Image: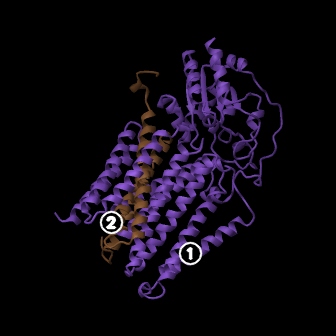
Chain colours: A purple, B brown
Amino acid sequence: MNPQLIRGLGYITASIFFIFGLKMLSSQATARRGNRVSAVGMLIAVVTTLTAMEDIRWFWIVFGAGLGCVVGVLAARLVKMTAMPEMVGLFNGFGGLASLLVGWSEYHGKWAAADPVSLFTTVALFLTVLIGAVTFSGSLVAYGKLSALIDGRPILYKKQNLVNAFVLGAIAALGILFCAQKLDQLSSGGSALVYLELIGIIALALVLGVLSTIPIGGADMPVVICLLNSYSGLAACAAGFVIGNNVLIVSGSLVGASGLILTRIMCKAMNRSLANVLFSGFGSATSAKGAGYQGQVNPIAPADAYLILEAAHNVVFVPGYGMAAAQAQHVVRELGELLHDNGAEIRYCIHPVAGRMPGHMNVLLAEANVPYEMLVEPQDVNPTMEMVDVAIVIGANDVVNPAAKEDQTSPLWGMPIIEVDRARTCIVLKRSLNPGFAGVDNPLFFKSNTRMLFGDAKASIASLVSEFKQ
Amino acid sequence: MELNATTIPLLFFVFVLAMFLGVELIKKVPSQLHTPLMSGSNAISGITIVGALIASSREGGTAIATLLAVLAVLFATINVVGGYLVTDRMLEMFKTKAKDGGKP
């Protein structure tokens, strides 16, 4: 058969697998199979490509792919569930880097052979290296912030937007020069210059990725991770335009679109615009804080908290990043089971932006064997919050901050929250009274129905568990 | 594919339709599944491995072009293999009560 035909059919089959895989990923019952379907699609795409290629440099391909497999398998097996956000971020960055390298290699080949390049191809090349590089360096910064290698707080400096605008302008200028290269320039003296323009674009795009990620605080990371995920798809898509390859365009745009949707869901969950997340440096020391709240704080000892829980019939756990940081998910599940055996109805209410990536808490609780049905969303609990005897807040802060609906001056104003302040009793597990990641004071701590259980979340829950077992 | 006045509009056609399809596919995903969805789609973005494979064996490619392409194969493979495995590992943990026969 005609190799072109084989390739076309193979790529269509692969695309169908990707589409069904994604579709199945959006329902819990089929998600695992969906992921495997999509993996088979990838295998089909790779095999098709190799079949339709003529001279294959097997040694190099086996070398690159073999090493990649080893690294990928090890990373995927060894990573802890709590470290999942940074791992996903890192993989994402590698995808962006790969697209960048594909574009660069493609151009280098043409440049060295003095092949003429059309305007269409140069524009696609420009977009590939730009998006790929921003994805790569942005993901590395996100990785650093999430794994606490670098300070997670927003890094802000004077004239930040001016610097970013300057870098962006320089990239645009170089991009125009690069795209407008004359076809005959390649074979004449101008070729070295054109190549330097490409290198300049790559370098500046790497800088841009760093500059645009450092002002974003840890609590906004779910949005950034989604956005970078979208970028990595778009980079692959642009690479598809460079080499005129359908399957890259289809899969790349599927990923690009899904990343954008997730980004939108995250922004909505915080009642903020994407521009606000990206440029405001939310939660930095310089941003406005809510009015300083004052009042009586009611601390509680584990023994007294036990008495409250023992009498409770309806308990809601509200986990946040603090649960991940303290690795408390297993003791939380144990406490949940004890309460359940004690006759209480147990639910785990998870805010869409709790933690450091979308669905972060769900993954951790699933790891601790909490059944999927017990994980609920804020809109399932809020309407009947008055019926909840005890809401246990574990290391969550901004997502339960009543200032979001009480204080118009608060930076959180308007954000949909889990309204634990309306529960009969609210027990907040926290190390101290320090404000959360966003740096906004939380009036919840001073409410008359709130009890503060100070200390490490894991230790506090463990002591509650031992009280129950006595 | 040869890039010319006939094929370029076709590529755009594919691009636009796939974007719309992507939006429709993901629109109604429950928030419980956001993480696996993200890491699963992240693995798909490793499709750039196809471009890397093609680039690695280009006819008359120079050493540098091949080196860049092999690096692309390496990183794309990490993205693909790691992404799918990590997603599978996560989804393995998402259990329902029925399957477990009650509490674990």
Rendered location of residue A245, percent (x, y):
34, 65
**Which quadrant of the view contains residue A457?**
top right
**Residue plotted at (33% across, 64% down):** B54
Image quarter in which the N terminus of chain A is found? bottom left
Kind of element beneath mark 1: helix
**Residue A137 located left or right of residue B2:** right
Q: Nearer the viewer, residue A320 or A23?
A: A320
Q: For the view shown, which residue lies furthest in the left direction?
A: A1
Which residue in the structure is indicated by mark 2? B57
Dot 2 falls on which chain?
B
Residue A270 seen: no
Front-lying residue, A401 or A110 = A110
Residue A178: x percent and y percent? Answer: 50, 79
- Whether tag 1 and tag 2 are in contact, CB under 8 A, the answer is no
Mark 2 belongs to which amino acid? Answer: Ser
The quadrant of the picture occupied by the C terminus of chain A is top right
Is A309 drawn above or below residue A427 in the view shown?
Answer: above
Nearer to the camera, A209 or A420? A209
The residue identified by callout 1 is: A172
Q: Nearer the viewer, mark 1 or mark 2?
A: 2
Q: Is residue A7 above or below residue A115?
A: above
Vertical arrangement, residue A467 with respect to residue A105, above or below = above
Mark 1 neighbour class, 10 Å CA radius: few under 14, some 14 to 19, many 20 or more: some
Give the left or right position of residue A358, taking residue A237 as reference: right
The answer to whether any part of residue A14 appears in the image is yes
Disc 1 marks a residue whose amino acid type is Ala
